[in-house]
Amino acid sequence: MSISVSEALRPARKPALIGVVAVVGIFVGVWINDTYFSDRTPVQPIEFSHRVHASDNEIPCQYCHIYASRSPSAGVPSVAKCMGCHTAVADARERPEVLKLAGYWDRQEPIPWVKVHDVPDFVHFTHKRHVLAGVQCQECHGPVQDMDRITRIAPMTMPWCVDCHTEREVENGRDCWTCHK
């Protein structure tokens, strides 16, 4: 009595189908997560282009992020700061995103920006120390001046920070590393 190949493989059909469905499900899940739930490039309430402002118009980072050199937080510009320029730029006043900005100004509401570069609450990070040490914004935030929508480039994890401190031979970086290997 001979058994055909299809007869011999019949018991493996169900596990193979489950495996294929699981692999496809994982790929679809990762795609959905990256497309709709990823915090690497969140959709902002106003589509603000750093390329237009920082590159095309050569506005320095600290013109808008005024607290970077004197505070833990770099801060985001107030609506008044934005309107200070956009009131004067005549052709910009009719653009849809500038009209959104003007709406926040008229309602006297702050713009509810979504954080892109965030670290856990237990992390003590200060922009001030890094800016005063000569660390360029792009070293952590990537080539922001080329981005229309901000994307988190660096992982902002402890090993990433420790590697940077070790490479720069920052004393605190070496001190931390002795315990946190």
Image (cartoon, rainbow, N blue to C red):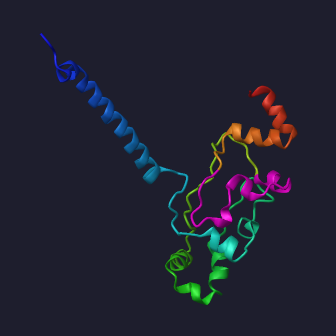
Q: Quadrant of residue 56?
A: bottom right
How far across and how far down the image is residue 136, in percent?
78, 57
Pick out the residue farthest to the front.
2
How far across and how far down the image is residue 73, in percent?
71, 55
How far across and how far down the image is residue 146, in percent?
65, 66
How far across and how far down the image is residue 158, in percent?
69, 38
Query: In this figure, what is the number of numbered marks?
Result: 0
Q: Quadrant of residue 77?
A: bottom right
Q: Nearer the viewer, residue 98 or 102?
A: 98
Q: Magenta includes 5?
A: no
At 42% from the left and 48% from the top, the residue drawn is 31
At 63% from the left and 45% from the top, the residue drawn is 155
| Residue stretch in magenta | 127-153
At 63% from the left and 86% from the top, the residue drawn is 89
Would residue 155 appear left or right of 25 to someone viewing this image? right
At 59% from the left and 70% from the top, the residue drawn is 49
Q: Is residue 132 above or below residue 6?
A: below
Q: Quadrant of residue 165?
A: top right
